[in-house]
Image (spheres, rainbow, N blue to C red):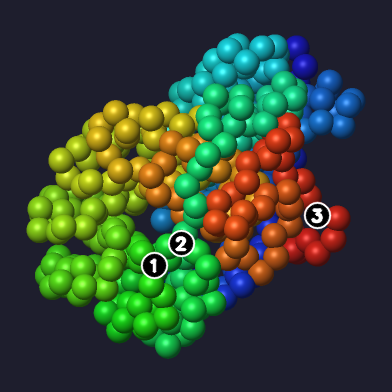
Amino acid sequence: MSRLRIETDILRIPFRDPFRISRDMSGEVAVTVVVQISSDADREVGRRGLGEGFPDTYYGENPDTMAAVMPLLLEAVQPFEERLGRDPDETRAALVGASTSMDTAIRHHGAAKCAVDIALHDLAARRMRMPLHDLLGLSRDIPPTDFTIGIDTPDMVGWRASRASRFPALKIKVGGPADVETLEAVRAVYDGPIRVDANTGWHPDQAVAMLPDLERLGVELIEQPFPATRLQQLRWLQERSSLPIVADESCVVYEDLESLVGVVQGVNVKLAKCGGVGPAKRMLERARELGFKRFLGCMEETSVGIAASAAVASLADWVDLDGCLLLGADPYEGLELDADCRWMLSREPGLGVHERESELPPRV
């Protein structure tokens, strides 16, 4: 059996603009983990699979926890290596088996699993000489991405909204001291849909009092207004809101979907939460069966993570895949936006992204 090996890089990349959310007001540097996975045979021909996992301390992960579990995850997926690339059906089955094996080996650790899962999908598609979305049997026709603006003064958020006005929707982080004033500033310079994301930062009385203003200002959806476990509060607000409430921190993995039926109208699926491409595809498909509006989100990832997310974006109603656009410098290239702000899925094998030859951010 050819043994898989993994190489890991921790990247610290300054944000283009300070990126603050209600539960994390630091917002200066993104820290993400990129991996390369290959077998002995792959290395002989210069082939490897790229993957990325963005560790969020909210979910109990950091680069150290990822490093600690990577050997266990690699061992869990090793039995499936020889089946990757034989034919599409067997390859897809092996990828599902690898994901299940990681879940059996250890619970949680979504970002670490995500990095391994994306790398395996990239490697398998490269072996098959197929773009990843083709291997998954998914369409190239995907919704456009919105653009996210972090918490800041209303004037500053308004200025950033003006600068991002080419995007068909803006996602505004709220939960700060001046939410309505901030949204007023955005609406003064931008006439498209506004999506608001409180990242658990609102209280019920505050949220319900804001509903008339949110409707007046053309807000399209409200993402995670309350703490993750407050499902009754989410249900209470959804019953009073004409706008869809979307669960994010309350919707981490596949198993969370059933508990949200009748609670919210939408769910936000992210690869770094659920464990990668395969788990995200299965979550989006199940969410559709359960009648949810489906939001495909991201962390502050490079083009590696965003390209992997874009491969399953045809399963989503709304797309928030702007992580690499928030970075001061993206160390990978090959992923491009079209004139309508849709990511153009690569026709090259795998993810279709590769490391830039220059302007790499510092490694730690």
Q: For the C terminus, give its image quadrant.
A: bottom right
The kind of residue tagged 3 is Arg
Dot 3: element: loop
Question: Label 1 crowding class (10 Å Cα cut-off): few <14, some 14-19, many 20+?
Answer: some
Report the residue at 42% width, 81% height from top.
189
Q: Nearer the viewer, mark 2 or mark 3?
A: 2
Label 3 sits on residue: 356
Q: State left or right for residue 274 relative to residue 32.
A: left
Left or right side of 252 for 70: right
Nearest to N terminus: mark 3 or mark 1: 1
Please identify the quarter of the rendering in which residue 116 is found: top right
Three-letter code for the amino acid on which mark 1 is drawn? Gly
Residue 362 figure quarter? bottom right
Question: What's the CA distance linking mark 2 and mark 3?
Answer: 29 Å
Tell me which corner region of the image, top left, top right, bottom left or bottom right, holds residue 222: bottom left
Q: Residue at x 47, y 65 (%)?
A: 148
Provide the residue designation for mark 1: 192
Q: Which x, y percent locates residue 233?
A: 14, 55
Residue 56's disc is none
Quarter of the picture containing the N terminus is: top right
Q: Amino acid at mark 2?
A: Pro
Residue at point 29% right, 50% down?
Answer: 247
In the picture of the structure, the residue carrying the numbered disc 2 is 168
Give yes or no for contact between labels 1 and 2 (Cβ–Cβ under 8 Å).
Answer: yes
Q: Residues within 10 Å of mark 3 (few under 14, many from 20)?
A: few
Q: Is residue 200 visible?
A: no
Seen as rendered, the residue at the extreme bottom is 155
> Could you say whether the residue bearing mark 2 is in a helix, strand or loop?
loop
- Foreground residue, 245 or 112? 245
Image coords of residue 229 (percent x, y): 23, 50
Query: Residue 65, percent across and down?
Result: 55, 47
